[in-house]
Image: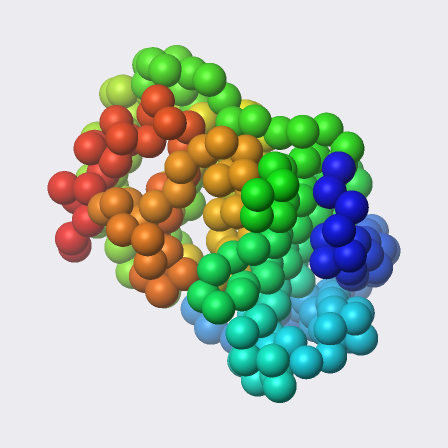
């Protein structure tokens, strides 16, 4: 496992925020919920977890900036470093009592993600990576899957829902992908989807219209586990465009060949 001070700070913050999420998940029916957009909700659990993350990260690195899902952008004295955090990726799952959600923390240095942690508090699964140091699930080194044949591959994706763009594009993507693969899953947490690609549980993942906090940590996890991550059309501006394609070296190109021509619409 990586033992750097930075990773220890990130894991410590995630575990503290995760304890509160576990308690709230156990009382999900009592959660107060407010709507912040079409089919897009924020709960008190989100806000409490984000407050804990911000406090712990800023206590350890007070000069770093912050990009947070609920709190927005906070500029720091150190303009090269920014935390990119999602306190609860999979909010809708959480609200419905589905035990599949995570905390995501990425560290950006001068425009490059250099550290990432995705933590599933219910299962105590901590996915962590630091640039050049590999990727780990708790203490075990992770590698992306070795599958070479799309017909044997299981992919993950996200489905655009009410109020989100891209419905017709998604239908075209599924029409192109479904006949070629063994299965497609939609679990509802992009951060965990990317972590699962890094761990070899999924062979690939693609989604459009994501936010930086959804994918910042996961991008590094996949790359440090030996995988490839690009935009669906092959570019490197995932945090700006919100489109991402992650897979092992054998399948990334084949999946991209199916999806890239469908990017418009």
Left or right: 172 as drawn, with respect to 243: left
**Relative to 73, is 177 on the left or the right?**
left
Q: Position of residue 238 (x, y in %)?
A: 37, 56
Image quarter hosting the N terminus: top right
What x and y, as percent, mark residue 103? Answer: 67, 55
Task: Please say which color scheme the image uses.
Answer: rainbow
Q: At 70% across and 69% down in the image, what residue appears? A: 50
Residue 27 drawn above or below residue 111: above
Total marks drawn?
0
Residue 239, percent from left and from top: 41, 61
Q: Is residue 195 left or right of residue 230?
A: right
Q: Residue at the front extreme?
A: 132
Residue in view at x 64 percent, y 76 percent = 64
| Residue 181 relative to residue 89: left or right | left
Residue at image x 34%, y 25%?
A: 251
Q: Quadrant of residue 137?
A: top right
Figure check: 181 above or below 127:
above
Q: Quadrant of the C terminus?
A: bottom left
Residue 174 % position (x, y): 27, 35
Q: Is residue 144 visible?
A: yes
Residue under the point 26% across and 45% down? 234
Q: In the image shown, does 6 or 124 lie closer to the viewer?
A: 6
Q: Is residue 223 above or below residue 84?
A: above
Q: Where on the picture, by quarter, is residue 224?
A: top right
Is residue 27 something one can see in this rendering? Answer: no
């Amino acid at each position: 496992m990586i033992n750097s001070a930075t990773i220890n700070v990130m894991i410590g913050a995630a575990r503290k925020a995760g304890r509160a999420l576990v308690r709230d998940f156990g009382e999900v029916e009592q959660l107060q919920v407010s709507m912040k957009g079409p089919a897009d909700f924020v709960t008190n659990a989100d806000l409490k977890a984000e407050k804990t993350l911000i406090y712990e990260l800023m206590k350890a690195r007070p000069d770093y900036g912050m990009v947070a899902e609920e709190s927005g952008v906070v500029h720091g004295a150190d303009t090269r470093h920014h935390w990119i955090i999602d306190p609860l990726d999979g909010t809708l799952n959480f609200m419905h009592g589905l035990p599949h959600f995570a905390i995501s923390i990425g560290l950006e240095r001068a425009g490059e993600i250099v550290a990432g942690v995705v933590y599933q508090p219910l299962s105590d699964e901590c996915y962590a990576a630091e640039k050049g140091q590999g990727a780990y699930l708790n203490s075990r080194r992770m590698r992306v899957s070795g599958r070479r044949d799309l017909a044997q591959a299981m992919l993950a994706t996200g489905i655009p829902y009410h109020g989100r763009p891209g419905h017709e594009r998604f239908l075209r993507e599924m029409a192109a992908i479904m006949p070629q693969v063994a299965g497609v899953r939609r679990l509802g947490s992009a951060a965990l989807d990317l972590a699962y690609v890094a761990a070899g549980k999924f062979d690939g993942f693609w989604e459009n219209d994501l936010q930086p906090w959804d994918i910042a940590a996961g991008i590094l996890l996949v790359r440090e586990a030996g995988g490839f991550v690009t935009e669906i059309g092959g570019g490197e501006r995932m945090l700006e465009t919100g489109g991402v394609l992650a897979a092992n070296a054998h399948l990334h190109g084949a999946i991209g060949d199916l999806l890239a021509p469908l990017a418009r619409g």
